[in-house]
Image (spheres, helix red, strand yellow):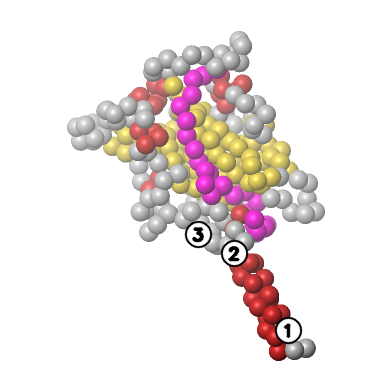
């Protein structure tokens, strides 16, 4: 083999090696103990929606003060090659930041920090990179736990922490906004029972083909949620979730 041919072969080998290193993390197979991973770009997204009419399933005309907060989770599911392409169940826990301006221990006009907590368990979750879950907060709760700038705080200002667990084991987590303290959601006062699953409100008719089947074994939105484990530190090559800065 000529010297030029050897150099050309070596050049192609280097290009191939670099191309392997450039493959994005989401296209690589996640480790088997983390079958659920939040989407890197929009793992947690929020929107303000009007509750659908149960009589026609059509969206009513939005009226000021009647907007619900919809928290949607975007995640992927990867099952083992020899297993069925479904997970028996996946539980999502969320912590939604808010402010209680009426707490007597808070300063006037500032109140104290709170988190609204909720849980949703889905069953027979199919394998794929575009799966979704949703939870909802009522207009009254939004007004009660926002600041004097209104419910838009839940979009512009407040953070949301979400975790995906399987059989009590943490698979992945996601913060909608980066925080200096990765444990920020453990510090505020917990307000339970104000984050609803779709089958606890009229959103049971909200895009039923978009979400897996909800488990009916939970009696409340978050009272059965396990204590939040410390956030993991996912390997950069296997998890798309952004790690909060220290």
In magenta, the rendered stretch is 27-52
Position in image of residue 157 (x %, y %): 35, 38
Q: Nearer the viewer, mark 3 or mark 2?
A: 2
The residues bearing labels 1 and 3 have C-alpha atoms spaced at a distance of 45 Å
Q: Residue at x 43, y 37 (%)?
A: 96
Disc on the earlier residue, 2 or 1: 1
Mark positioned earlier in the residue sequence (1 or 3): 1
Disc 2: CA contacts within 10 A as few (<14), some (14-19) or many (>=20): few
Disc 3: CA contacts within 10 A as few (<14), some (14-19) or many (>=20): few
For disc 3, the marked residue is 233
Q: Nearer the viewer, residue 81 or 93?
A: 81
Residue pictured at 68% horizontal, 37% vertical = 123
The C terminus sits in image quarter: bottom left
Q: Secondary structure at mark 2?
A: loop
- The relative height of residue 101 versus residue 66 in the rendered view (above or below) is below
Q: Nearer the viewer, mark 1 or mark 3?
A: 1
Which x, y percent locates residue 116?
42, 34
The residue located at (55%, 62%) in the rendering is 235
Horizontal and vertical percent position of residue 194: 45, 28
How far apart, in angstroms, are the residues tagged by discs 2 and 1?
A: 26 Å
Asked if the stretch drawn in magenta spans residue 40, the answer is: yes
Q: Do residues under tags 1 and 3 come within 8 Å of each other at their CB atoms?
A: no
Q: Is residue 222 above or below residue 23?
A: above
Residue wearing tag 1: 5
Q: Are marks 3 and 2 in contact (CB under 8 Å)?
A: no
Tell me the CA gap for discs 3 and 2. Answer: 21 Å
Mark 1 element type:
helix
Specify whether residue 60 is painted magenta: no
Residue 113 lies left or right of residue 10; in this view the side is: left
The residue to which callout 2 is attached is 22
């Amino acid at each position: 083999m000529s010297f030029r041919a050897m150099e050309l072969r070596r050049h192609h080998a280097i290009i191939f090696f670099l191309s392997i290193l450039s493959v994005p993390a989401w296209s690589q197979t996640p480790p088997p103990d983390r079958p659920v991973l939040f989407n890197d770009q929009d793992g947690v997204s929020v929107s303000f929606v009007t509750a659908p009419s149960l009589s026609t399933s059509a969206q009513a005309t939005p009226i000021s003060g009647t907007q619900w907060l919809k928290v949607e989770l975007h995640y992927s599911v990867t099952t083992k090659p020899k297993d069925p392409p479904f997970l028996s169940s996946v539980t999502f826990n969320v912590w939604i930041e808010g402010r209680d301006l009426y707490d007597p221990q808070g300063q006037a006009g500032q109140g104290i920090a709170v988190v609204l907590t909720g849980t949703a368990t889905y069953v027979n979750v199919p394998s794929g990179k575009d799966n979704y879950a949703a939870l909802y907060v009522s207009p009254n709760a939004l007004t009660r736990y926002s600041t004097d700038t209104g419910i838009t705080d839940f979009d512009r200002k407040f953070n949301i922490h979400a975790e995906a667990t399987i059989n009590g084991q943490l698979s992945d987590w996601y913060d909608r906004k980066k925080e200096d303290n990765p444990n920020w959601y453990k510090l505020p006062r917990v307000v339970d029972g104000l984050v609803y699953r779709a089958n606890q409100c009229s959103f049971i008719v909200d895009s039923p083909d978009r979400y897996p089947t909800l488990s009916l074994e939970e009696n409340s939105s978050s009272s059965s949620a396990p204590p939040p484990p410390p956030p993991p530190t996912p390997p950069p090559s296997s998890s798309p979730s952004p790690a909060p800065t220290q």
